[in-house]
Amino acid sequence: MNIAIVGATGNVGRKIIEVLEKKNFPVDEIHFVASSKSAGKKLKFKGKDIVVENLETFDFSKGKITFFSAGGKISEKYAPIAAKHSIVIDNSSHFRMDPNVPLIVPQVNSKDLNSVKKNIIANPNCSTAQLVIVLKPLHDLFKIKRVVISTYQSTSGAGKAPMDELLEQTKLSLENKKINSKHFTKQIAFNAIPHIDQFVDEGYTKEELKMINETKKILDNKIELTATCVRIPVMVSHSESLNIEFEKPFNLEKIREALNNADGCKVIDERKDGGYITPVEAEGKNETFISRIRNDPSKKSTLNLWCVSDNLLRGAALNAVEIAEAYLKTNNER
């Protein structure tokens, strides 16, 4: 299997390389592709140095599967070119709501891989990916009516430069020096910013609408959702507080059992100090962790829970590679 990774030098690109290695994915040749600035650099794959190739001159016929992790504008321009020669798995938001492009989380809707019309498969927003993995087993059993989502998202969701800025701002803050934010609308160190991506309709941001619209496309268009997305001073892993209303009655024992048995989920829910998972502990782990499971006494057939997942891994790179695995299995090509 010949693989190409566009945006190989970025946060998610490097994670894809790591996941391919750990999974021992069947790779014959691998091509690392990036902008002209990064072309010529070397990245390792299974102990070997691989020279990064220039996106502008790359021959996409070299890859049977091409991962894109270089942003929406790059995907818009180059993914259709790559799709003439290979299956494209795109991590940007550009194709997610295209009705002719499947939006996939394999644990939830791998059946949608039966019809890949444009040779392009979209990977959802990292916050959506962990959300639908949690909702799917519960929806199957109790039918979800409505979800209220509050996110607590790490700086890595915005890229490497914002992560570096968090470190820089933290140092400046501790030294009582002036802070000028470059990649955030407000100071991020020791703060929380209720704003991710651009403002769009009726006061919502793009990030919030992504979660709503992508969840409907992946899981069930009838589910009602509302979201508030917040950036917090954490390096890696996104957290979500969910209020879930069901059409059918449930009990917490069945909720825990369903989540623990679901692929990609792990329940850590002890009602004591430290009996839950935080972003630091989720980093580097494949699972989406669920904690703080409890009834909502203010509304019938409703519960609250907390979920945490490594956004670079579970929310992006791992899901992208699992899409490739599911596609190969569906199409009997592996």
Image (cartoon, helix red, strand yellow):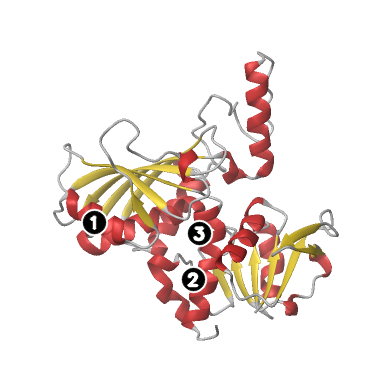
The alpha-carbon separation of the residues under discs 3 and 2 comes to 10 Å
Evaluate whether residue 322 shows in this view: yes
Of tags 2 and 1, the one toward the viewer is 1
Evaluate whether residue 115 shows in this view: no
- Point out the tag, 3 or 2, that comes first from the N-terminus: 2
- Point out the tag, 1 or 3, that comes first from the N-terminus: 3
How many discs appear? Answer: 3
Q: Report the quarter where the C terminus lies.
A: bottom right
Q: Nearer the viewer, residue 295 or 184?
A: 295
In percent of the image, x 61 and y 76: which residue is there? 26
Q: Amino acid at mark 1?
A: Glu
Q: In the image, residue 232 lies at what x, y percent?
A: 51, 33
- Point out the tag, 2 or 1, that comes first from the N-terminus: 2
Q: Report the quarter where the N terminus lies.
A: bottom right
Q: Looking at the rendering, which quadrant does residue 78 occupy? A: bottom right
Q: Looking at the rendering, which quadrant does residue 158 occupy? A: top right
Give the residue number, with chain letter if any, for mark 1.
257
The alpha-carbon separation of the residues under discs 2 and 1 comes to 30 Å
Residue at the extreme front of the image, as rendered: 47
Q: Check residue 102 in the rendering and tell me which mark sits there, or answer none.
A: 2
The alpha-carbon separation of the residues under discs 1 and 3 comes to 26 Å
Q: Check residue 124 in the rendering and tell me which mark sits there, or answer none.
A: 3
Badge 2 element: loop
Q: Is residue 45 left or right of residue 93?
A: right
Q: In the image, residue 324 lies at what x, y percent?
A: 55, 72
Q: Amino acid at mark 3?
A: Pro
Q: Amino acid at mark 2?
A: Pro
In percent of the image, x 50 and y 84: which residue is there? 331
Residue at the extreme top of the image, as rendered: 176
Q: In the image, residue 20 lies at what x, y percent?
A: 60, 66
